[in-house]
Image (cartoon, grey):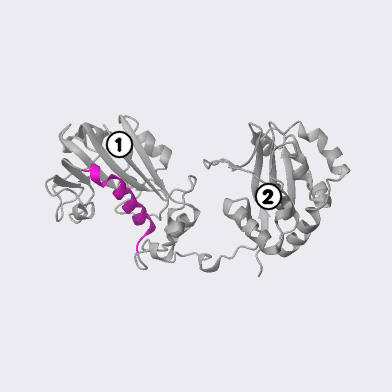
Amino acid sequence: MPKQYVPNVFLKIEDSQLYAIFAWSQRTAEIVTSKSWLTILEIFVHEHSLENAYQIFQKVKYASIADKVIQELEEYEKLLQDAIVFLADGSLTIFGKGFRSFIEKEMQFELGSLSRETYQVLPQLFSQYKLEDDLESIENIEDFRKLVEHLENLGFLSPATGSIDWGDLKKAVPICQAFGLTRGKPVDRYYLSKFIEEIQTQIGGNILEIGGTPKDKDFYKINPGASYQILNLEAGPGVDIVGDAHDVSVIKPESLDSVIIFNVLEHCYAPWVVVENIYTWLKPGGKCFAMVPSAIRVHATPVDYWRPLPDAFAWMFRNFSQQKLYVYGNPTTVIASYHGIAVEELTSEELDAYHPDYPVATCIWAEK
C-alpha cells in the first residue's frame, strides 16, 4: 500500500521567525525556512496520498493568493505573536492563546474549510515573514518526494491514521523476553558502553563498584594498580563487602576515590538515600559514575522499583559540586529496548539518534 501522510506540527512565531515547535517537548524548535514546506504541510491536511498531493502542489505553486484568503485572514494575522497554528488530519486551527487555548478550548479558530478550498492559508498567514520562495524549484515528483521525506524525518509529517505498518511489533509478547540477549546485544548495553568510553579515564584510585561482578574490572579497563572492590547484598565470587548500600555504615566516610553503580539504583527502594551515602563515602573531589535504564522491561532481581528520568537523576546528585548527564535514546530505540530487539538489528544512525523526550539510558558523572 502506498504511504499516506498527515501533518503533525505546531507553528509559532518567535522573534520574527517562524518555527515548528513540539508539544510539551524538550526538543529544540525547528526553523521553517521555505514556502514549499508550508504549502506541502497544508496540502497533507486534506490529501494523504503523495501522488495526489503532488498534483495539487503543481496547481497551487503557480497560483496567486486568492482575494478571499487575504480578506478572511486579515483578522487573524494580529493574533500570530501569541498564537500557535496546529495542523492535523483535516484540521488547520489557530489557537489564539497558544497551548492554553489547546487545553482550555478557548480562542480556537478553525480554518480547515478555507484551506481545503485554496491550499493557501499558511502561505498567506505567514506572508510577512521571510521564507525562501522555492516552489518552482520543485520540478518533478521525485523532488516532491524527497522534500516530503525530509519533512517526515523532521517530525512534521507522520503516517496517516490507520496506515501504520506495525509488522512484527503488533503483538502482546516481546520479540525477545531477555532484553535482546537471545538475538545479540541489548540496546541499553550499547549506551552503557558509550558512557564508559566517555568516563573510563576518570575512574581510578580506591574504587568501589556497587552490584558489580569481577569481570567488570576488565570491561571498564581499570588501571591494574587501582584498588577495586565490589559491594553486594549477598556473598558471592569476587564480592568483597556484603551489605546494603542504603546503610551508610557499610563503608568508611571519605574513603573512596571512585564509585561505580550501573543498573542498580532502579532496584533500590530509596535510590536517593544510596546517592547520599555515596556522597558520604567519597573523598573530596571523588567521583561517582552511575547509569539507570529509563526504558526497559521490568526485571525483578530481586525487586524493581524505579525508572529515574534525567531530571530525577540530576536531582538525586544535586549535592555534588559538579555533575554531567549523558542521556541516550530515541523513539526507535525505546521500542527496541522494550521489545528486546538487539543492537545488531539497528544501524548506527538509528542507535545514535537522540531525542530528549525518549531516553533509554540515563547516565551521570558527579564530583564531590
Give the side of residue 155 with respect to residue 126, left or right: left
| Residue corresponding to mark 1 | 366
Above-or-below relation of 14 to 222: above
Q: Residues within 10 Å of mark 1 (few under 14, many from 20)?
A: many
Most extreme residue toward the right is 67
| Residue corresponding to mark 2 | 37
**Residue in view at x 35 percent, y 31 percent:** 318
**Residue in view at x 73 percent, y 43 percent:** 93
Tell me the quadrant of the picture where the N terminus can be found: bottom right
Q: Nearer the viewer, residue 61 or 250?
A: 61
Tell me the quadrant of the picture where the C terminus can be found: top left
Residue 49 spot, x, y in % from top left: 71, 63
Q: Nearer the viewer, residue 302 or 90?
A: 90
**Residue in view at x 14 percent, y 53 percent:** 238
C-alpha separation, residue under disc 1 versus residue under disc 2 = 43 Å
Give the side of residue 62 with respect to residue 82, left or right: right
Q: Residues within 10 Å of mark 2 (few under 14, many from 20)?
A: many
Query: Image quadrant of residue 84?
Result: top right
Label disc, if present, on residue 29 of the rendered structure = none
Magenta span of residues: 185-203
Residue 214 spot, x, y in % from top left: 17, 54
Is 342 a magenta residue?
A: no
Q: What element does badge 1 sit on?
A: strand
